[in-house]
Amino acid sequence: MMKQRIHFSFLLGVLLTGSPVVADDVSVATGPHASADLTRRVPVATSRSASATEAVSATTKCLKPPSGEANTNALPPLPPGVTELKFGEFFRQPIGPRGLESTEKLRSLEGRRIRIVGYMARQAKPVSRCFLLAPVPLTLNEIEYGYADDLPAATLHVFTSSEAPATTPYTPGRLLLTGSLSLGNRLEVDGRISTVRLQLDAPTAEQNAAAHAAAKKVLATDPHAGHGH
Amino acid sequence: MKKMKRGLRRKISPFGLSAAVLAAASLAQAAPVVSRLTPPSALFTFGDPGAPYIARFLPGQRFDLQATIRPDTGFTITNAEFRVDGKLVALPITSTPATVAGLPVNTGVWTSRAFSTLTPGVHALAVTAYQDDGAVVSTNGNFEVVQILQKGRRAKNIIYLIGDGMGIAHRTAARIMAQGAALGKANGPLAMDLMPQTGIVMTHSLNSIVTDSAPGAHCYSTGNKASNGQEGVFPHDTTVAFDNPRIEYIGEYLYRTQGKTLGIVTTADVFDATPGAFAIHTQDRGAGTGICDQYLDEAVPFSGLRVLLGGGRKWFLPAVVSGSQRAAANDYVLPGELASGWGVPAGVVDTNRDLISDFTSSGFYYAADKTALDATPSNEDRLLGLFSFSNMNVAKDKIDKRRHPGSLGVVDDYGFPNQPMLDEMTAKALEVLAKNNNGFTLMVEGASIDKQAHNMDSERWILDTLEFDRAIAVARQFAATNVDTLIVVTADHECAGINIIGASMVSNASLLTRAAAGDGTTQLRAGVVGTYDAAGFPSYQIAGDGYPVTTDPDRKMLIGYAANADRYEDWLTNPQPLRDSQQPFNPVAPLNTYPTGPLNRDVAGNFLITGQVSDSTAVHTASDIPVYADGRGANLFRGTMDNTEVFFKVMQATLGGSTGL
């Protein structure tokens, strides 16, 4: 099973980005920001250090052991023309009197190439050439619950290239995706309204062929492959 | 004895009336079968015609009649009739297919809407169904209409204060923290201690000894039992969330008959079960879009809803606005027969509805934070306040921000640094509602007493109990100058099996050291948990804002949980609450650094307390809960009572009055 997961991570990475999938530490807040949070609450909450560990453990299900290894999750160098974007940078804080408002950074990246780390949402009703990338691993059961789910406000609708296979297999674990960002409300074929979208880079012809072959082979031997467990 | 008798009858029922027995019968029935008759009764279910009567109503209180009827295979039910005391009910009757799993496909649900009778006493309810081959089935149930006695001055205003999950020990813990005790006596009372009348309430729901918050509040607003997860309705056999048989709410009844308006104030998301159970009729307490739409579509015109304060803005934003959670799957459209039977709008699926704007177009002043709430113009008589996207932050975290306005705190992480306290919301609600000369019903909920008890976050639920107590004080101040006001303080159920087990025997400095040592029971139980004499009298210093200067003094009070999930415990105040998955920023920094559960915090001390339940957090219990009353009609609230009886006492005070206070 583990081998299969790795295989699919690789498959997805090749399919979607044309570049290696890299597991990033998506919980960016385990860095200085989180430490600052704990420090600033000392006057009221008494000083204690356990929460730093708790905080990490709460977000590290898919991570390597955090102690002293945070740097192993470092991303590869940013390619030219690509901006790093994090889910926490989507919306302004504090929240105003109505809805969430996008940050200047997010607005400035419209039409630009970005890369982002997140988790592919596991959907009961996957749709063609589109999936959701969320800041946390999550399962969406549209069949039982419709769209009444706790999908985070900061979620990306990700679109694969028309050259990629129509179905993107569910892939657990962190994903690093690179593509072009687009903004604005739009009703998607999955029935949801997207606000932030990522059009993934097309795969190379070589990757594409390999991916098609691999997908066929796996699906032939295990029809449940790629749908999690 | 009665229960045993009913249980015995259920097992040997010769009547063929029990739904359970009938469901198990073979397909080769000789006649059509009625598998459910609503309102529910022991007569239908167990063949027991005696008290206690399960369904009880006020004179004139409206409710739906419904029967689930299965014809024989290959046949059709052509008609059904309801009779009350042998007299044909003259209301329209309609049928819809039963869609819950396990029923044969040709089973139908037959309904007559908005029945009522003014005659007190026990009434016989019968349904007769006619099959197209001439076969007929008739089945009996009953319900009671409660007599209101005219016997004194009536209450004009009703203030329900519901501490969600607040059992007797929550109150004791709050008093010990806020007032302290010495030489065997409490140093002072809570506001709720000053309520002159006290009773005990039994809290079972229609389908369990342990209720959730929907039936736990529905009993106070309808006088009836509901099944868990359901509010304002009886259970039925379709899967549609908003088409159940309804019971008229206190707000609907009093607005229709007396012009009294309604206010709902909560620290939860306003779609949550307790606020919802005062205005919304649904079998799905989670259907946020439809619930919040119905506040405006139904509760404003038909319950006189004039104040709605709490969290939950995510349901009020058009789906195209980031952060909106409006979704077609949990919106509402009523069947035509329901809408016409009750005279209410059918609704539409409208995920892009701007519900805040619709409220303001209906004359509501909208407050998005404390500053706007404080600035409510004095002439406003309609008030909507949505102070966060989901549940509001708890008292501890709101107070921390007020004490350290220049620092970033938990409320900043949630994106709403300027939220009002419950007592401030209560004061503003009373100000607005008091403008109605006919009086009002106000429901105030201390919601996170329950939510933080679930999380076994002791200091957070204690401070929320203190916040709730301050709201009680505000209500009592109002009643002092508005003497025809009845105040009822209670809970919906106990949460987490909480009690005060004693006090720490060590200083906070020592506790900090022990909590970092990783030695489990040897550091955090032995030598720390002081029981009996060793507990002494824990002492907390209270600041000018009414809350403790610190919740980690030396020799602090220690709390135990009897309905607990596994947790690590170090007795220290948690700097952060557990994550709340309903918050829009829950998965991103900095909220994603918050602990996800009781096994993800306090881990350094390595003191694992294993729970009896396999849930991730503590659960509700079936324990009785206290009810306290003050003001006009308070003397009715004595002794031990079913939770539905609280409703009838409130209505006796309001419709018939009572002698004395």
Image (tube, grey):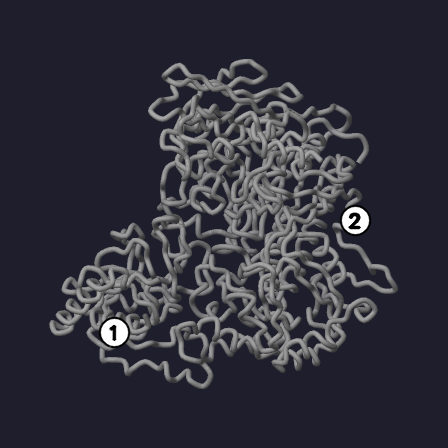
Q: Residue beneath label 2, please?
A: B194
Where residue A17 appears, x then y in whole percent? 22, 72
Q: Chain of mark 1?
A: A
Q: Residue at x 62, y 36 (%)?
A: B7
Question: What label does residue A138 carry, if any?
Answer: none
Q: Is residue B392 above or below residue B479?
A: below
The N terminus of chain B - image quarter: top right
* Residue at the outermost bottom position: A68
Frontmost residue, A88 versus B286: B286
* Image side of residue B526 versus residue A218, left or right: right
Using the image, determine if residue B440 lies above or below residue B76. Answer: below
Residue B155 to residue B358: above or below: above
Horizontal and vertical percent position of residue A108: 29, 68
Left or right: A121 with respect to B114?
left
Query: Is residue A219 in view?
Result: yes
Which residue matches tag 1?
A10
Which residue type does callout 1 highlight?
Phe
What kind of element bears circle 1?
A: helix
Please identify, in this view, whether the residue under mark 2 or under mark 1 is nearer the observer: 1
Q: Please give the name of the residue rendered at 53% of the width and 63% of the height, measured from the top-left corner.
A: B417
CB atoms at circles 2 and 1 under 8 Å apart? no
Quarter of the figure with residue A23: bottom left
